[in-house]
Image: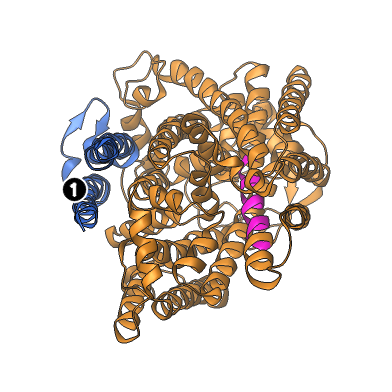
Chain colours: A orange, B blue
């Protein structure tokens, strides 16, 4: 009860802070609305970029995912940070020099073509909406577990908050709320991580505790984890299970995809100078690395804590968090051997993907399931990986205020990313579709009004995704990165580094990257899901990694087509020379 | 014309910096973290196998350092080619 009161307090205070900031930084012009008046300090922009980038997936899901994947989870750690090196060295300074408002704007101008602009807008909207759907689900999970309100109510509250500061403040409002959200988020992530690191290893720095020995034992944490996981029939925690080529391609697709995500790129349009854009990418990665180097430590702590606290424990005395998450529907227990104790090991406990609960309670008081038990293994526990970070403080028996803090942090992560995405969607509609393509005569005031209307509509659609989550959310994440890597990133890169690339090449490249990547993902993820295994994959590359090949296809087609068609006009030559100068 | 030449020189110097840094970026993440990580695992530092450490910690630290080296080198380059020109 105490934790719940504190959660209301923390979440309420953080929301009040965001609204206050939004009111203070209202947007007065399109320049304010799209790029925060280009007056954001590089450190502030670094924080805002970090908050923009680190979504509900990074904050809530990633450590849980790594906890269960072990070493295979490294693809996310390297993939989602290494992209910033590409962004800093290859894109950010030049796009800042270009100085326009959106990513399609650069593509449309550099390739002197509204068709190229349109292809970019379509890719952008697809990538961004994919992403938003995940954020709203994150908001729903946090609200339903910690504030015990309906998921729908939670989503609506989230929508109202985002609506308030995104529509009113535009990029300016979003930037300064993101700075606040970063602080809330990182504090909420580090505090429990430090506590748990001290509890398990005695070392207050999680990054070091991760490689340290257990308290009162000469055994290293990772060695213990390898032993426990193999004893239970899993792969050893620090061993790879995927093939090297697949790990390589997934990491590459995530890196190039990260560098091609429009909502991250536009953050670098908001700083005053080219040199600030470079610096700001560095700060952004520092702020991101703070969470990303902590996450694998949290993952290892969580895995070992989770196993320790439930293995062979009688359900009647099982910890409260286990029953709370069971009530939310993200944990299930089926007493296969009828001994009243929880046994956790490798394999799916149940037939079917998700547990289906009936309304009755079993002999030990557990929620009875309609699923058939999976008889090929003795695992009795279903657990949704998304809950690990949220449940971790409870599993480690940390005080109520830490749990409340994590709830506020999860909301900050989800809301800051949602706002950033909604802004790029609305600005690509009002600026690229209306002002630059279909209604060039509108005044700046009208464009600002349309931007606000578009933001409002985008929020409504995102909210609908949260209330009626499409079943395919998990599958489409591969889509977002694959498409960003195979369409937007190559178009931007070649636009800067090649003067020869013309409009025909760029459009052909984007379309071929798009079609190649999308059809591979649709084939394995939607049409023939039973064939989705390494035997059938092209060169052993999974749909998650195919964006990397899509990018190579794009480069090849774009350069070949350009070679056989007319050179770009002289003013494009001058434009490229201009963006190459700081 | 002189201006145009110095622009090209600046761009070439820029490309050199970017390629060297990206080579390091590739070797540390794709090399140490993936392709040669199992060989590096033979070396143990504290509780970490080295390949595992690069994949889950080390590569991220190197990424941060690379960007700041880039910032430093580019600021120096900008100064050499542009700020001194302004004063002439």
Q: Is residue A366 visible?
A: no
Q: Is residue A426 magenta?
A: yes
Closer to us: A48 or B33: A48
Q: Is residue A410 left or right of residue A457?
A: left
Q: Residue, x 51% and y 68% (percent of image)?
A: A108
Subunit bearing disc 1: B
Tell me if residue A410 comes above or below residue A110 in the rendering: above
State whether residue A538 is above or below residue A365. below
Kindly tell me whether residue A496 is visible in this rendering.
yes
Total number of numbered labels? 1
Q: Pinpoint residue A539: horizontal percent, then vertical percent.
A: 31, 72
Q: Measured from the top left, where is residue A23 in percent x and y?
A: 76, 31
Per the image, label 1 sits on a secondary structure element best described as: helix
For the point 31% across and 57% down, the residue is A248
Q: Residue furthest bottom?
A: A564
For this rendering, which residue is in front, A160 or B56?
A: A160
Query: Which residue does the image show at 50% across and 17% down from the upper left?
Result: A195
Residue A15 lies in magenta, yes or no?
A: no
Taking depth in this image into account, of A13 and A269 the one nearest to the observer is: A269
Q: Is residue A53 left or right of residue A399?
A: left
State left or right for residue A313 relative to residue A99: right
Majority secondary structure of the magenta segment?
helix
Q: Position of residue A90 (x, y in %)?
A: 34, 52
Residue A185 in the image, given as x and y percentages of width and height: 58, 30
Residue at the spot of label 1: B20
User: Residue A252's quadrant in the figure?
Assistant: bottom left
Report the span colored magenta: A416-429
């Amino acid at each position: 009860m105490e934790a719940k009161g504190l959660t209301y307090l923390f979440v309420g205070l953080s929301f009040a802070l965001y609204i206050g900031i939004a009111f203070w930084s209202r947007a007065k012009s399109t320049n304010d609305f799209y790029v925060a008046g280009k007056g954001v300090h590089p450190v502030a922009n670094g924080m805002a970029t970090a908050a923009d980038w680190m979504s509900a997936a990074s904050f809530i899901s990633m450590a849980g995912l790594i906890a269960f994947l072990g070493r295979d989870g490294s693809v996310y750690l390297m993939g989602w940070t290494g992209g910033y090196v590409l962004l800093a060295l290859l894109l950010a300074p030049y796009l800042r020099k270009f100085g326009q408002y959106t990513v399609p704007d650069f593509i449309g101008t550099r390739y002197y073509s509204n068709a190229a602009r349109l292809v970019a807008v379509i890719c952008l909207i697809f990538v961004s909406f994919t992403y938003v759907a995940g954020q709203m689900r994150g908001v729903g999970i946090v609200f339903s577990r910690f504030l015990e309100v309906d998921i729908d109510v939670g989503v609506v509250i989230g929508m109202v908050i985002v609506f308030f500061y995104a529509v009113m403040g535009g990029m300016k409002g979003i930037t300064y709320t993101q700075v606040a959200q970063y602080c809330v988020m990182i504090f909420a992530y580090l505090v429990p991580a430090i506590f748990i690191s001290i509890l398990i290893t005695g070392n207050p720095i999680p990054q070091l505790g991760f490689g340290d020995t257990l308290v009162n034992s000469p055994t290293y944490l990772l060695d213990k984890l390898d032993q426990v996981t193999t004893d239970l029939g899993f792969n050893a925690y620090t061993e790879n299970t995927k093939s090297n080529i697949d790990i390589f391609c997934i990491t590459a697709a995530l890196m190039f995809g990260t560098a091609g995500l429009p909502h991250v790129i536009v953050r670098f349009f908001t700083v005053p100078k080219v040199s600030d854009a470079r610096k700001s990418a560095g700060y952004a990665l520092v702020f991101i690395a703070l969470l990303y180097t902590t996450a694998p430590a949290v993952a290892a702590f969580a895995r070992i804590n989770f196993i320790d606290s439930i293995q062979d424990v009688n359900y009647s005395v099982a910890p409260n968090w286990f029953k709370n998450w069971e009530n939310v529907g993200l944990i299930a227990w089926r007493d296969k051997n009828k001994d009243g104790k929880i046994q956790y090991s490798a394999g799916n406990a149940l037939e079917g993907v998700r547990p289906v609960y009936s309304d009755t309670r079993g002999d030990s008081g557990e929620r009875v399931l309609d699923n058939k038990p999976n008889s090929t293994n003795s695992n009795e526990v279903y657990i949704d990986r998304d809950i690990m970070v949220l449940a971790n403080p409870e599993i480690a028996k940390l005080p109520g205020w830490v749990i409340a803090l994590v709830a506020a942090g999860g909301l900050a992560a989800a809301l800051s990313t949602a706002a950033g995405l909604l802004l790029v969607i609305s600005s690509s509609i009002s600026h690229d579709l209306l002002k630059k393509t279909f209604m060039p005569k509108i005044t700046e005031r009208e464009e600002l009004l349309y931007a606000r209307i578009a933001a409002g509509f985008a929020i409504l659609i995102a909210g609908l995704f949260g209330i009626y989550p499409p079943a395919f959310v998990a599958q489409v994440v591969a889509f977002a990165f694959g498409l960003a890597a195979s369409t937007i990133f190559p178009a931007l890169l070649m636009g800067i580094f090649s003067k020869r690339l013309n409009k025909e090449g760029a459009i052909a490249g984007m379309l071929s990257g798009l079609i190649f990547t999308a059809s591979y993902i649709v084939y394995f993820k939607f049409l023939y899901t039973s064939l989705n295994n390494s035997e059938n994959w092209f060169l052993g590359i999974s749909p998650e990694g195919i964006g990397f090949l899509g990018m190579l296809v794009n480069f090849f087609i774009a350069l070949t087509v350009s070679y056989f068609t007319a050179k770009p006009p002289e003013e494009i030559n001058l434009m490229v020379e201009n963006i190459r100068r700081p | 014309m002189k201006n145009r030449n110095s622009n090209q020189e600046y761009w070439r110097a820029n490309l050199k910096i970017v390629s060297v840094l990206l080579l390091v970026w590739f070797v540390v993440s794709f090399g140490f973290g993936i392709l040669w990580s199992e060989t590096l695992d033979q070396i143990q530092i504290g509780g970490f196998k080295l390949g595992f450490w690069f994949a889950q910690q080390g590569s991220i630290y190197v990424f941060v350092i690379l960007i700041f080296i880039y910032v430093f080198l580019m600021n120096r380059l900008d100064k050499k080619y542009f700020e001194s020109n302004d004063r002439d």
